[in-house]
């Protein structure tokens, strides 16, 4: 379960502290998916950084699976992030010199246990890229690269999958296919899925819908 309570985030600025998140709360159970929309600059990426154990909040509490990453010793924070959280960004961030299969395996380099190569191959099959395992990212289309990024985000079976504008750079048809793959993987793995998007079409696919406005999440689910 993901639990956020009274989360605030301030950034220093010459004009005084910039309050981006102002007491935000959110609870999601395993298997739930939520979309977050909101104007540019409203703090969506800031929120994902906090949930992704990349940047500590100014105040408030956050637990994932009962653990607060920000109370862990520094050495354990990276392991928490690697083990429990998958990220998918607008830009796929693949390593250009590594093959598709190697890119999917990157998170496993610092993890132990499991037959990761077999799992990577299964994921590549599920995202329709079995035939591309030995190709380099430069040989793939934008949609194919994003599918590799999805497989990489899922290789360690994360509890939480964070997507920041995952289809922002793709044409409509490719975006729809990526959305389908994301939701299919979410359903298979029962991860918690959080989807930040500007796209109504993408948000429509997810049952819980929020808007980030004035530093808080407004529940838009009931408005459907
Ligand atoms: N590291 C940072 N230092 C200072 N200001 C930041 C930093 N990160 C984000 N901001 C500011 O916080 C606000 C929210 O940014 P962001 O979370 O990227 O919004 P969104 O993803 O919704 O477009 C913006 O005003 C941005 O300039
Ligand atoms: Mg953003």
Image: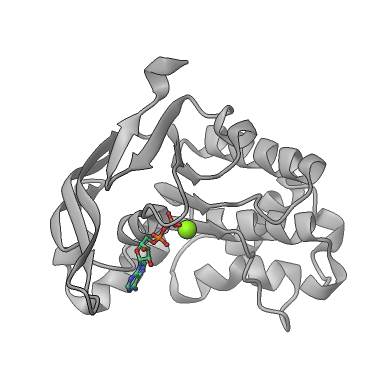
- Quarter of the rendering containing residue 145: bottom right
Q: Is residue 4 above or below residue 169?
A: above
> Could you tell me which residue is drawn at 25 percent across and 53 percent down?
21
Quick check: 52 left or right of 106?
left
Residue 120 visible in the shown view: yes
- Quadrant where the image shows the N terminus: top left
> Of 145 and 90, which appears nearest the observer?
90
Quick check: 90 left or right of 161?
right
Residue 171 pos. (x, y %)? 79, 48
Residue 136 visible in the shown view: no
Quick check: 159 left or right of 16?
right
Residue 163 pos. (x, y %)? 51, 51
> Could you tell me which residue is drawn at 44 percent across and 70 percent down?
111
Q: How many marks?
A: 0
Q: Quadrant of ligand 1?
A: bottom left
> Could you tell me which residue is drawn at 38 percent across and 16 percent down?
222
Quick check: 109 left or right of 30?
right
Q: Residue furthest front?
A: 15
Residue 168 pos. (x, y %)? 65, 52
> Could you tell me which residue is drawn at 52 percent across and 69 percent down?
108
Residue 9 pos. (x, y %)? 22, 60
Q: Is residue 213 above or below residue 110?
A: above
């Amino acid at each position: 379960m993901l639990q956020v309570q009274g989360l605030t985030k301030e950034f220093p600025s010459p004009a005084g502290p910039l309050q981006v998140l102002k007491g935000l709360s959110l609870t999601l159970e395993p298997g739930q998916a939520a979309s977050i929309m909101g104007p540019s600059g409203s703090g969506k990426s800031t929120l994902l950084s906090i949930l992704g154990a990349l940047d500590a909040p100014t105040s408030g509490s956050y637990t994932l699976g009962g653990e607060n990453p920000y109370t862990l010793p520094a050495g354990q924070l990276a392991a928490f992030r690697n083990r429990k959280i998958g990220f998918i960004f607008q830009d796929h961030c693949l390593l250009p010199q590594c093959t598709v299969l190697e890119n999917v395996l990157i998170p496993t380099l610092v993890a132990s246990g499991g037959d990761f190569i077999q799992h990577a191959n299964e994921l590549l099959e599920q995202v329709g890229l079995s035939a591309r395992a030995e190709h380099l990212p430069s040989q793939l289309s934008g949609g194919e690269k994003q599918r590799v990024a999805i497989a990489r985000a899922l290789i360690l079976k994360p509890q939480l999958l964070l997507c920041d504008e995952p289809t922002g750079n793709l044409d409509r048809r490719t975006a729809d296919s990526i959305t389908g793959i994301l939701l299919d993987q979410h359903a298979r793995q029962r991860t918690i899925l959080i989807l930040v998007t500007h796209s109504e079409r993408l948000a429509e696919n997810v049952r819980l819908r929020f808007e980030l406005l004035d530093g808080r999440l407004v529940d838009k689910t009931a408005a459907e």
